[in-house]
Image: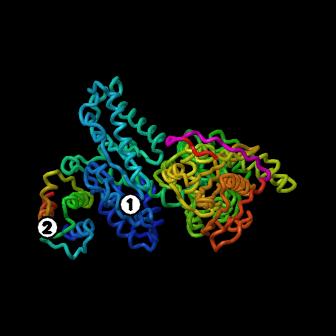
């Protein structure tokens, strides 16, 4: 499974929305459930799903699909 | 043991909630957050029925990140959860008229607070406090007063969970040696909390999350990134462990409790097969794997100490198993530890039914442990309600295989609980006597029974509430009450709470029956009348009723109404009122008018003096 598909599923699962709603350009403001608490749960879910250890600065920055995909490529 | 991804795959493929639980057990492993959400979605799709559950959270730190785990754990335990989170930091404010918490009417309320919320000085250096004991006393008073305010306004269970300290002790490795040890300071406070709750607020429960911190380790329990950025202390591992632990309370409140653990013998209590290996060669003793079986037996003995019964269900020649129980030098569980034994070649589902019948408990009060997959499956299919735990293949995992099962937890421990196992052993002897007595009357006469009846006795609130929650068979109305409810009845002059204890030549059975009466003018209503199954069949109910009718007649009561509400389990008391001279009013209502007091047979009845309670002097007869 490519990074985008995997990420899309994790976002959909975390916020309880259909996967089709998540696109390559989706950002925090596009998903109502992606609030500040939801964001932290998403970051924790990403860590578990992709085997990452995010630092606080990364968590604050990774607020959109493109930002997360870029991070995953660099990681 | 199943590896973690394997367990999750099995759980996701399970076709029932029990199947998911099986796949995930033993539940000491952390699940990744995405899998928790996946499992929650899967559990939602399963056809199992779920009962509604209302949990409220009152907190002084961020607890919103716990939500996925509350959802998952609730679904796993068969609940459809509605969660109310009080505004951040709002404690007593939530008790004011119109506050969200009161309107919500929770079944269980968890208070997530930190030590420093109890006293401003606890936020600073604890070891530097000159007035240590004063601070402790003030913190304790503040907490107890706050909990008393919650108890007064809120229904349901109330559970206090204090956040474990997040950093190492101020004095480092010297703390353990120090006169002003920080660890000792908080241990003292915790003992103070427990003691005052036991004495003053017995229906508020203190859950010690420090135990969890010891289990997981601070580094695992907390996620400092979340704490410093969002005031949310728990890691993914920590959050799920906290929620799993606290979920015991709703389960104990709303689900059938396990009363008896039924154990297989070969490869469960010891390694190997007694019929083939012989008593010398089974694995039980100081060397592995015998050491793990030994540890498991000790854990079972500890569970018996919580008031649970043990029973044996093994396909073997009885003589072979008895030889181990009687003669093996390392066997921990002896004959006297088992309340019932079925060692034969009959199918185990039949033996499970026979054990339930012998102990007078429902099938849903049994937990069955067996290493054999076939036997486990047979029990699941043929004995609905029985909880089944397949003993792990590796002996190493065996001692912990019953850990974390909420239905094995207890919220209080009464004297009856502590003595229960011995009482059942006495009962086995009693049944032998019954077989030798010429007639039932002779037998009852020979028991030399003495009943002590007491009224509105606050000492017994916990046990009386427990009886209403656990008694299913000899229970005319099956109304469940909490300890707080019972205490309210004590204080209400229109209500009378009666209980009885029963003793005979085999020993004291403890407090085994109760009745709740509502007095209105010259009429009395029997709201609740019940009796523990362990004293059924000896006329105790008639003696108790006769005594109560005497008390009511003395108080000028001219008619008594009784009710019978049928359930799946209380068929045995269907004819109770008619047998005792009451006449039918309608399908569920019976009446005795005028009140005549029958004579008790075979039982000497004495009244028990109540001790004055906290709220004042008990009412006079």
The reply to whether residue B289 is in sight is: no
Q: Residue furthest right?
A: B438
The residue under the point 55% across, 41% down is B617
Q: Position of residue B480 (x, y in %)?
A: 53, 59
Q: List x then y, in percent, for residue B12.
A: 39, 68
Give coordinates of residue B492: x percent, y percent.
Answer: 52, 52
Residue depicted at 25% across the width and 52% down the height? B88
For label 1, the residue is: B105
Label 2 sits on a secondary structure element that is: helix
Q: Chain of mark 1?
A: B
Q: Nearer the viewer, mark 2 or mark 1?
A: 1
- Is residue B50 one of those drawn in magenta? no
**Residue B86 makes an appearance in the image:** yes
Q: Is residue B397 left or right of residue B346?
A: left
Residue stretch rendered in magenta on the structure: B600-616
Lateral position of residue B609 relative to residue B153, left or right:
right
Residue A4 in the image: above or below residue B513: below
Q: Residue at x 58, y 39 (%)?
A: B611
Quadrant in which the N terminus of chain B appears: bottom left
Judging by the rendered image, the residue that carries numbered circle 2 is A29
Where is residue B141, by image quadrant?
top left
Q: Is residue B593 left or right of residue B440?
A: left
**Placement of B160 over or under B178, stated as above or below:** below
Check disc 1: other Cα within 10 Å, few if <14, some if 14-19, many if 20+. some
On whether disc 2 and disc 1 are found on a single subunit, the reply is no
Q: Residue furthest bottom?
A: A20
Where B597 sits versus B507, above or below?
below
Q: Residue at x 21, y 76 (%)?
A: A20
In the rendered view, how is the structure colored? rainbow
């Amino acid at each position: 499974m490519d990074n985008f598909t995997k990420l899309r599923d994790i976002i959909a699962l975390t916020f309880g929305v259909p996967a089709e709603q998540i696109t390559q350009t989706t950002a925090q403001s596009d998903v109502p459930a992606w609030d500040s608490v939801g964001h932290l749960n998403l970051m924790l879910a990403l860590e578990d799903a992709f085997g990452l250890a995010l630092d606080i600065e990364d968590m604050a920055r990774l607020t959109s699909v493109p930002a997360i995909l870029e991070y995953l490529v660099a990681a | 043991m199943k590896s973690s991804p394997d367990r999750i795959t099995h759980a996701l493929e399970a076709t029932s909630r029990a199947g998911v639980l099986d796949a995930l057990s033993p539940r000491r492993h952390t699940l990744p957050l995405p899998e928790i959400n996946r499992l929650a979605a899967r559990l939602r799709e399963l056809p199992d029925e779920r009962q509604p559950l209302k949990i409220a959270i009152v907190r002084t730190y961020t607890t919103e990140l716990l939500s996925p785990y509350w959802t998952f754990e609730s679904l796993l335990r068969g609940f459809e959860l509605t969660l109310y989170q009080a505004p951040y930091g709002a404690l007593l404010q939530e008790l004011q008229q119109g506050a969200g918490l009161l309107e919500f009417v929770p079944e269980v309320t968890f208070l997530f607070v930190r030590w420093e919320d109890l006293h401003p000085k606890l936020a600073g250096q604890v070891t530097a406090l000159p007035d240590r004991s004063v601070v402790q006393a003030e913190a304790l008073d503040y907490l107890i007063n706050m909990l008393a305010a919650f108890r007064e306004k809120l229904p349901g269970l109330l559970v206090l969970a204090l956040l474990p300290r997040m950093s190492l002790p101020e004095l480092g490795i010297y703390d353990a040696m120090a006169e002003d040890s920080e660890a000792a300071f908080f241990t003292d406070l915790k003992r103070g909390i427990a003691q005052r709750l036991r004495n003053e607020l017995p229906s508020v429960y203190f859950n010690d999350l420090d135990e969890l911190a010891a289990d997981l380790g601070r580094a695992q329990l907390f996620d400092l990134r979340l704490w410093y950025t969002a005031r949310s202390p728990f890691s993914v591992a920590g959050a799920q462990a906290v929620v799993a632990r606290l979920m015991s309370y709703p389960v104990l409140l709303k689900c059938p409790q396990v009363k008896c653990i039924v154990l297989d013998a070969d490869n469960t209590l010891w390694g190997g097969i007694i019929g083939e290996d012989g008593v010398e060669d089974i694995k039980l003793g100081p060397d592995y794997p015998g050491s793990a079986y030994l540890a498991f037996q000790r854990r079972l003995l500890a569970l018996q100490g919580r008031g649970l019964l043990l029973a044996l269900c093994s396909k073997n020649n009885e003589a072979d198993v008895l030889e181990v129980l009687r003669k093996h030098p390392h066997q921990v569980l002896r004959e006297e530890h088992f309340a019932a034994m079925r060692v034969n070649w009959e199918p185990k589902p039949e033996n499970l039914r026979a054990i339930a019948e012998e102990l007078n408990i429902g099938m849903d009060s049994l937990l069955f442990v067996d290493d054999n997959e076939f036997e486990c499956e047979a029990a699941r299919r043929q004995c609905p309600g029985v909880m089944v735990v397949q003993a792990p293949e590796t002996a190493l995992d065996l001692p912990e295989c019953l850990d974390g099962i909420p239905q094995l937890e207890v919220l209080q421990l009464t004297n009856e609980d502590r003595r229960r196992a011995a009482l059942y052993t006495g009962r086995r002897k009693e049944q032998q006597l019954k077989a030798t007595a010429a007639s039932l009357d002779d037998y009852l006469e020979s028991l030399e029974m003495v009943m002590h009846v007491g009224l509105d006795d606050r000492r017994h609130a916990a046990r009386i509430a427990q009886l209403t929650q656990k008694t299913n068979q000899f229970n005319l109305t099956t109304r469940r009450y909490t300890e707080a409810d019972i205490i309210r009845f004590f204080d209400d002059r229109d209500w009378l709470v009666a209980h009885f204890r029963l003793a005979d030549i085999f020993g004291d059975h403890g407090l085994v029956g109760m009745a709740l009466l509502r007095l209105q003018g010259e009429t009395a209503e029997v709201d609740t009348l019940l009796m523990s199954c362990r004293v059924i069949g000896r006329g105790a109910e008639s003696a108790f009723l006769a005594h109560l009718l005497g008390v009511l007649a003395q108080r000028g009561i001219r008619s008594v109404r009784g009710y019978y509400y049928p359930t799946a389990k209380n068929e045995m008391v269907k004819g109770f009122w008619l047998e005792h001279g009451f006449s039918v009013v309608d399908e569920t209502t019976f009446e005795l008018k005028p009140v005549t007091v029958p004579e008790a047979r075979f039982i000497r009845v004495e009244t028990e003096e109540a001790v004055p309670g906290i709220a004042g002097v008990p009412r006079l007869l």
